[in-house]
Image (spheres, rainbow, N blue to C red):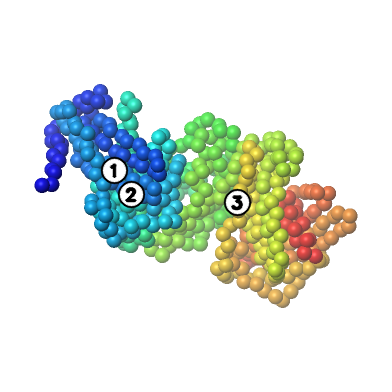
Amino acid sequence: MKKITCLCVSGNSSNTYCPDTKVTCPKGTICARVHALSTAGNTSVEINKSACLPVYQCGISGSASSLNGTLRLVTICSTNNCNLPEPELTGPEPASSINGLTCPTCVSENAEWCNANDFMQCVGNETTCSTYTTKVLGTPMVFRGCATMTNCILSKLTHSTNGSDFDFKFDCINNGNPLTCIQCLSTNSTSCTGNAVTCPNGYFCGTSYTESTVAGVTRYIRSCTPQTQCDKIISVTTLYGTTKMSTSCCTSDNCTAPILAVQPPSSELNGVTCPSCQSSQSTWCHDAQTVQCKGEETVCALHSTTIDGKSSAIRGCARPSACDTQTYTINGKSIIYQGICSCGGNVSNTYCPDTNVTCPTGTICATVHALTTMGDASFERYTSTCLPIYQCGIAGSATFLKGTMKLVTQCSTNNCNLPAKFSAENLTPNGMVCQSCMAADADCSSSERMQCTGDEQWCFFQAADLTEMTSAKSAIRGCVTRNICDLGTQTYNALGIKSNVKYICSSGSKHFLTNLFTPLLVLCTLIMRNFF
């Protein structure tokens, strides 16, 4: 005969005394015993605790399996202070029966998410794909794999009283099948409704809320959201105001996730200094002004918003979470939030180790990564140098006759090893057509035209004059990103070479002239000379 376990869960859940933790449970909770066994590789942690739990978390028995990890968990409750027995752990039943569900699986330490490269076959009553986080010997860990639906009912199982603590969080995908989520956008309310759409596998129903005092806008979005964007809080502070953004998720069909509150950073200065600017017409801005960062806003970010091809940008202090890209499509309307981040710091007298110099006041240690191609030949260079702070966090490109130039800058004052990666290549034609030529002279002219692609939405003419032992001139025409044109004006001498680079950029009927004399463009010009 099959064994039957009866759980004591009846009674008034108000002010129940929980003897093991020596507390009186708050109204709406009940005295409970939690027994859990979590394994990761050869490490296992067992929890057998008394705690105050919400009534709906009573009588739960569940399990989860992942790559090199398992979880077995059960709860029982009482309101009459009975001596609660140790709940018996169970696993997937029957454990040997493959149920046809396949889930992505991975394990990661000190993280709330892991990217799965492997898949596992689920067994028994583990009939949903799940992500759960917990602590193993004090180390935060995340597990993805198969789970019982009872884990999804728990959602969160947390308790901390007098040293009796545990913390589990479960996110489940709808029975292993794609969710359907409402898709809508509102700019004047904290709610909206729209059509239900079927989400890709691995997506949850998300709520994104943006509030900006810089542009004076609010934006409320419901849509399918990748799991990596869930529970994310973003803030960017500039001289002109702040932008706050949060994304939360829920895991049932057409559910509405609550708006996450974004608390302002603490008032304590953290030593980071960032350039500050705004643009209402571009994904780029620059300015010599700076802002002192506070609290959790420890990176410098260029954060842009593009809605149906119309862009705006701000630059300032940000939480590290602002450094990602989020993309939504609402009723055919494309919405893109993009963050490009760099380290920040005090710009005065920063030591730049690779160049063995102390940067002058107003400049900052930077890594410049440049790649120039000419036909089948290419030249790549990483260089550390001192740059004005407003030239930090640049990611731009130019394309011309038989050649391309890509460059990116990142800055720091703590001598960290700065990664400097190029923006992703975008070969989609953008409608701009530019003259393309190259000459070892003060000018070049050609009937040849080229189709511009991606973010290279401007035509440029570059005239370079380099003086070393002798004087050399060069001229290039082609397509370029706006940020190359927007760098500003200054005079620069590097490696015994005096350089004067003049750019003329145009887009449609708009023309502007800038004399660029920057370390960044000097490097690229020097690289170009290697091919002549």
Kindly state the secondary structure of the residue where label 1 is placed.
strand
- In the image: residue 23, left or right of residue 353: left
Q: Position of residue 253 (x, y in %)?
A: 28, 56
Residue 361, placed above or below residue 457: above
State yes or no: discs 2 and 3 in contact (Cβ < 8 Å): no
- In the image: residue 122, left or right of residue 225: left
- Farthest bottom residue in view: 447
User: Around disc 1, counting alpha carbons within 10 Å, would you say few (fewer than 14), some (14 to 19), or many (20 or more)?
Assistant: many
Q: Nearer the viewer, mark 2 or mark 3?
A: 2
Q: Nearer the viewer, mark 1 or mark 3?
A: 1
Pointer 1 residue: 72
Question: 66 or 363, which is in the foreground?
Answer: 66
Amino acid carrying label 3: it is: Cys
Residue 50, placed above or below residue 209: above
CA–CA distance in space, label 2 to label 1:
9 Å
Pointer 2 residue: 65
Amino acid carrying label 1: it is: Arg
Q: Position of residue 335 (x, y in %)?
A: 45, 58
Q: Quadrant of the C terminus?
A: bottom right
| Residue 186, picture quadrant | bottom left
Pointer 3 residue: 285
- Farthest left residue in view: 1
Q: Position of residue 410 (x, y in %)?
A: 63, 47
Question: Which label is found at residue 249?
Answer: none
State yes or no: discs 2 and 1 in contact (Cβ < 8 Å): no
Q: Earlier in the sequence, mark 2 or mark 3?
A: 2
Residue sitting at 40 percent across and 44 percent down?
41
| Residue 6, picture quadrant | top left
Tell me if I can see residue 27 in this picture.
no
Q: Earlier in the sequence, mark 1 or mark 3?
A: 1
Amino acid carrying label 2: it is: Ser
